[in-house]
Amino acid sequence: MMRSTWVWRLCVTARSPAEQNRALMSATQINTPAAGIADANRRQEETDERIFGAAFDGHVIRRFIGYMRPYRAGLMLAAVCVVLFTASQLMIPLVIRAAIDKALVPGIMDAGLLTTIALAFAAIISVNALASLGQEIIVGKTGERILFDLRRAMYAHLQRLSMSFMDQTEVGRLMSRLQGDVGALQEFLDTLVTTLGDVLLLIGIVTVLLMLNVKLAMLTLSVVLILLIVRMIWLPRARKAFVRARQTSSIVNGALAENINGVRTVQEMTREKVNFVRFEKKAHDYLNATRRAAKFSTAMAPIVDTLTGAALGIVVYVGGTMVLDNTLELGVMVAFIFYVQRFFDPIRSLTTQYSVMQRAMASGQRIFEVLDVPVEVVDKPAAIELGHIDATIDATIEFRNVTFGYYPGQPVLKNISFTVKPGEVVALVGPTGSGKTSTTSLIHRFYDVWEGEVRVGGHDVRDVTQHSLGRHVGMVLQEPFLFTDTIFENIRYCSEHATREDVMNAAQVVGAHEFIMRLPQGYDTRLEQRGGNLSLGQRQLLSFARAIVANTDILILDEATASIDSYTERAIQTALVRLLQGRTGVVIAHRLATVRKADRIIVLQDGRIVESGAHHELLRGRGLYHRLYSMNYASFDDIPEDLIRAAVAQTST
Amino acid sequence: MNSTPTIPGTSEAAGASTLKTESTDAPALSINVILRILRMAARHRVSMAAGVICAVAAANFQLLIPQYLGAAVDHAQGMLAHADTGSQAARSALWTTAMILLGAGVLRGVFTMFQNYLGESLGHRIGYELRLAYFEKLQRMSFSYHDRVHSGDLMTRGMLDVEGVRRFVENAMYRSIVLVILVGYGGYHLLSNDLALGALALSFVPIVAWRAAVSRLWLRRTWRQLQERLSEMTRIMEENLGGIRVVRAFVAQAFELARFDKVAGDAIAMSLKRVEIRYRNGAMMIFSYYAAMGLVLWIGGLKVIHGTLSVGMLTEFLAYMAILQQPVRQIGMIVNSVARGSISGARVFDIIDLEPVIRDKAGAPELAVSRGVLRFEHVDFSYHPDGSGAPALRDISFEVGPGKTLGIVGPPGSGKSTLAHMIPRFYDVTAGRITIDGQDIRDVTLESLRTCVGVMQQDTFLFSAPIESNIAYGEPDAQQERIMDAAGLAQLHDYVQRLPSGYETLVGERGLSLSGGQRQRLSIARSILPGPNVIVFDDSTASVDAGTEQKIRAALRDLSRERTTLIISHRLNSLMHADEILFLEAGRIVERGSHAQILALGGRYKDLYDLQVRGGNDALDLGMAPLRDGTLAG
C-alpha cells in the first residue's frame, strides 16, 4: 500500500524503543517552554546524527527548484548580480596594477592616465556595491519567501492528510520537520549565494593569476593545495569535537530543565547536594568538550596565516626576482599580493559549506517526504453538500455491516450494524480496545471504512463533502483541548459568525459562566499554555461550550476518564445533559451515571456489538453489561483488567 | 512575625519584579554588569594576562606584513630605476623580506591561535562558573519563588543568557584589544608617514564602525520581535497538530490556515525588512571601504607622480587597508556582544544574587524526633505577604501523633494542599506556628525537617532515570531490596516486574510514560523509602483506581502504626477511618470530628457523604462501594 510505505519511511528512523517512548512524551512536553528548549536541543542532536550524508541529491534539488519557479525573474537578476559582483571584485587588483604599471612607471609618470584609472575604479566599485546589494537582497528575500512557501505547503498538506497518518506521527516529529528542517534549508539558502560567489571568485582569481603569469601563479597556488589537504584532514576530526560539544551541551541543558521543572520534588526529597554534584560533573564534561572543540577551531588560524605568509613570501621572492630579471611587471607583483590575501577566505568558507549542504539535502528529503504523503480521505468529485448551511438535517446515523481497522488484516470493527434515530442518545460501552473510539471516528469520516457503509442523514458519508459533514457532526473529545488564546476565542473557535452573546449563552448553559466571570479579564482572559491555568473540570466545561456554539445536529462525545472531585463531577454531569438536549448523541461512556442517562446502550466487545438496549433491559439480560455493572465501580475504567477479562470469559461461555 | 529577614533589593520579591525587564527591547547597557563580568574574568589572572599578551603580539605581527610588502616593492622598483638588477645584494634583500613575511605570518597565526583559544576557553570557564552558581541558587529558591516565575524564563536565563555572557568574554574582550592596536598603532604609523593619505586610508573606519554598530543593534532589537512572531507561529502549528482532532471535528482547516497565514505574514514581513537592512548596510560598508581605497590609489598615485611618495609606500597603504577590512567589520559584532553581555549578565546575576526566603537560621540544630507529634497552633497563611488577596489558611489548629491519622477534606481551593505544603516548610506560616515534637519547624534545619516529613503529591514529577533511581530519589544509595519493598507497599512492584527491563526501565521525558495512577504509586514509593515519621498523602491516590487504593491502604496500615499520617482526599472512603477529620472551607476548619461525629453534625460533610456514598438513581456513585470480588449484586 502506498500510504503505509510512506508512513513507514517517516517513522523508520524513529522506531527504536527509546525513541518510541520519547515520542510518546513529545506531545505532552511541548506544554512547558523549558522542555521546549530542551526539545529543540534534542532536535539539534538528531540532526547531528544525520550529518554525514550526500551533499547533493538530484531529487531534492529538482523539487526545490520547483519552489523557486515563481521567483525566477528575480533570481535571474540575482544571478547577473553575482557575476557582476565577482567580476568587479576581481578587477580591483587589476586596476591597481594598471596604475602602477602604466601611470606610475618611473620616467613616464602620467597624472591624466592616473585620474582616468581612478575614475574607472570609482565606476567598478559602484557596480560592485550595486551588484552586491542586488544579489544579497533579492536572494535573501526570495529565500525567506520560499521557506515560508515550503512551510505553508507542509502545514496545509498536514491539514488534509488522513487521521491514520496523523495518529502514527507524533507532533514533535512533525514540528521538527516544520521548524528544524525548514531552518536547515534556510541556512543552506543563506550560504547558497556565498557559495556560488566563492566558487566564481576562486575560478576568477585562478584564471586571472594564470593569465598574469603562469609560473608565479602555479607556485602560489601550490600553497592553496596544502590548505585544501590540511582542511580535509582537519574537518572530520573537528566535526566530531563539535558534535561532542553540542551533545554535552544538551545534556547540561537537559539536566537544568529537569531540575527547574522538578525543583519541588528536589527540595521535598532534599536532593540538592547530590544533584549539584551531578550537575557539576555534567557541566565539567561540557567545559572539557568545548575546550577541545576550541582547540580545533582555533588551530586553523596559524595554518591559514602561515600559508598566507608563505604565499606572500613566494610572491615577494620569486615575483621580486622576476621583476628584477625584467620578466614580470611590478604591478603584476602588487596585484598578486592583493589576490593572495583574497583567496584563502573563499576556500575556508567553501569547506564549511559542505556540511551545510549535507544537512540541507537531508532536510530536503524529510520535507518532501511529508509533502509526498498522499491524501487518503478526499471528497468525491460528485460529492454533495449535506443539508443547507443553517438548516437541520435528518440526524439519523446508520452503520451498515461496517468492517474497519488501522492495519491491514487486523480489523478493529467487525461487521457492525446499528442505527441511531434523530434525537436519541446512545451510549457506547465496552472494555478498552473494543472499538468505541473507532466507531465514533467513522461517523465523522476521520477514516474510511473497509467494508459496509456509514450513513449520516441518509447519505453515505463518502458521498458528501467533508466540510458539510463536519458542520452537522460535532465532537467533544476525551481530553479537552484548548488553544493558547482568550476564553472567548476558545469557545467560539471557528464558528466565526457567533456573537459574544452566543458565546456567553453557551457558557451559561454548561455552567461555565460563573467561573469565567471570576477570572481577571472574564471572557477575555488569555489561557496560557493551553489552559494549564484551569482545572481539568473547567477545561471540560469550556470544550462543552465550544460544542454548543458550533450547534451541530449530531454530537459525538468521548467522556473524560480522569478522576475529578465530586463537586466538579456534578457540574459536568449537569452540563452533559444540557449539551445533549435536542441533539442526536453518541457518547463513549465511562461513568455509570452517564450510561444510565442514555436512551440506549450498545455494548461493544472485541469489535462486535454484544448487547444493545436500555439500562434496565440490559440488566435483565444478565450479559456482559450486567456483569460489569454489578462490579459496582463508578467508572468502567476503574475495573481492574483481570476482572474484565474474567467477566468477558464468563459471558462468552 | 518574620523569622527570615530579607536583604533589601535582593529578596526574592525584588528578583521577581525585575523579571519584566527582560521583555523590554531597550538595551540597558549597564557598566556595572560589564565590570562584574570583567572582574570574574580577572580572577583567572594567568590566562587573562596571557590572552592580552597574545592579542598584542598577534596584532603587531600582522602590522609587519604591509610594511615589508611595501619595502619589497620599493626594493624592486628602486633597483629597477637604478638598473641595479643584477646585484646579489638586492636579491638577498628580497629573500630576507620573503622570510620575514613568512615568519610574521607564522607568528601572527600562532599568537592568534593562542589568543582565540584563551578567549574561548576563558569564556567557557566563566560560563561554567555562572552555570553552577545559577543551578545552585535555583535549587534553593523557595516554592513561592518558583510559583511566581515561569520555568521557561528560568530556562532561558540558564541557557541563552549564560551563553550571552560567554560570548561577550570570547568575542568582545580580546577582539577589541586587537582592533584598538590595529587601528590605533597601524593608523599612527600611516598618519606619521603621510598625514593626508593616512587620513584617507582610515576614512572608512568610522563609517563602517557606525553603520555596523547601528545596524547590529537594530537587527538585535528586531531579532527579538521576529523570534516572538516565529514562536507564535510555532505555537499555532504545534497546537494545530496537537489538537488535530479538534481541528478535524470542527472542520476548522480553513480557519486554521487563515490564522497561520496571518501570523506567518507578520513574520515574513519582519524578516524581509531585516534582510533589507542587513544587506543595505553591508553594501554601504563595502562601498565606503572601496571608495577610500580608490581615493588612496588616486591621491597616492598623484603623490607618487609628484615624487612625494614611493610606490612601495602606496602598496603598504593599500595592503594595510586590506588587513583592516575584516576587523573593522567586526565592530558590529563587538558592539552586539557587549550589549548582549550586559543584558544577559544582568539577567543571570539577578537570580544569583537572590536569597531564598526559606532557609536555615544561623546555627539551627537538627530536628530531634522522639515521637513525631505534629502540632498546628493557630496557623494563618497567605500567598501574598503584602496582605492583598484572601489568606489561604486561617486559624488552623490540630495535633496528630504517632499511630494516628488525620483526614482533611473540602471543596477545591479550600486550602487542603496548602496545609500539606506548610509541614515540610515549602512555605512559612504568616502567623501561628507549626511544631514537631515541640520544636518550631522554623528553628531546625530544612534538611532534617524534610527528611522527617514525606509528602506524596498528586502530580508526580518523574526524572529521566530508571524507575529504581526515581523511587530511591531521596536516598540514592538505597539497597535494591528496600526499593522493591517500597514499590511493593505502593502496589507498583507487580507492574514494574512485568516490564521487560524491570526496575531499570527508563521513565521520564525520554523514557516510558507512566499513567497518572502509576505515577502516583511511584510517588508513594518514593516518599515511603526514606522512612519519614510524618506521612502526608496530598490527594496522592486521586488517579489510582479504588481497588488498588484499598490495597495500598492495607499495605500501609502496618507502616503507619508508629507514624503520624495525614490524608487529604476528595474520596471520602479514603479518609473516613481517620481518627479525626477536618472539613476545610475557604482556609478555615468549619467542621471537625471523627467520621461518626462529623456526620452527625448534619452539615457539609454529610452533604458530601450523601453525594458520594448514598447515591440514588440520579446522583453519582464515585467508587464508594467496596469491592465485592466480582460477585453479582441484585
Image (cartoon, helix red, strand yellow):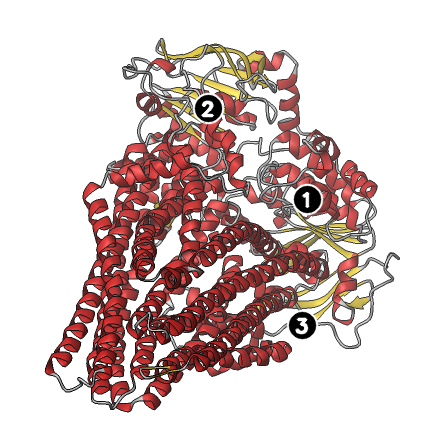
Which amino acid is tagged 1?
Leu
Which amino acid is tagged 3?
Glu
Q: Identify the residue position indicated by label 3 in the image.
A: A451
Q: In the rendered view, does A412 fall on the left or right side of B154? A: right
Which amino acid is tagged 2?
His
Q: Nearer the viewer, mark 1 or mark 2?
A: 2
- Name which residue lies at 15% across and 77% down: B95
**Distance of label 2 from label 3 (alpha carbons):** 57 Å
Between B261 and B510, the one lying in front of the other is B261
Q: Nearer the viewer, mark 1 or mark 3?
A: 3
Q: Confirm or deny contact between disc 1 and disc 2 (CB under 8 A).
A: no
Say few, some or many: other residues with alpha carbon within 10 Å of mark 2 (under 14 / 14 to 19 / 20 or more): some
Q: Quadrant of residue B441?
A: top left
Q: Quadrant of residue B591?
A: top right
- Name which residue lies at 63% across and 46% down: A484
Total labels drawn:
3
Q: Identify the residue position indicated by label 1 in the image.
A: A619
Q: Where is residue B610 drawn, in percent x and y?
A: 65, 24
Q: Where is residue B163 drawn, in percent x and y?
A: 38, 48
Q: In the rendered view, does B618 fall on the left or right side of A124? A: right
Q: Where is residue B5 drawn, in percent x and y?
A: 41, 15
Say whether mark 3 and mark 1 are on the same chain: yes
Q: Identify the residue position indicated by label 2 in the image.
A: B421
Q: Closer to the N terminus: mark 1 or mark 3? A: 3
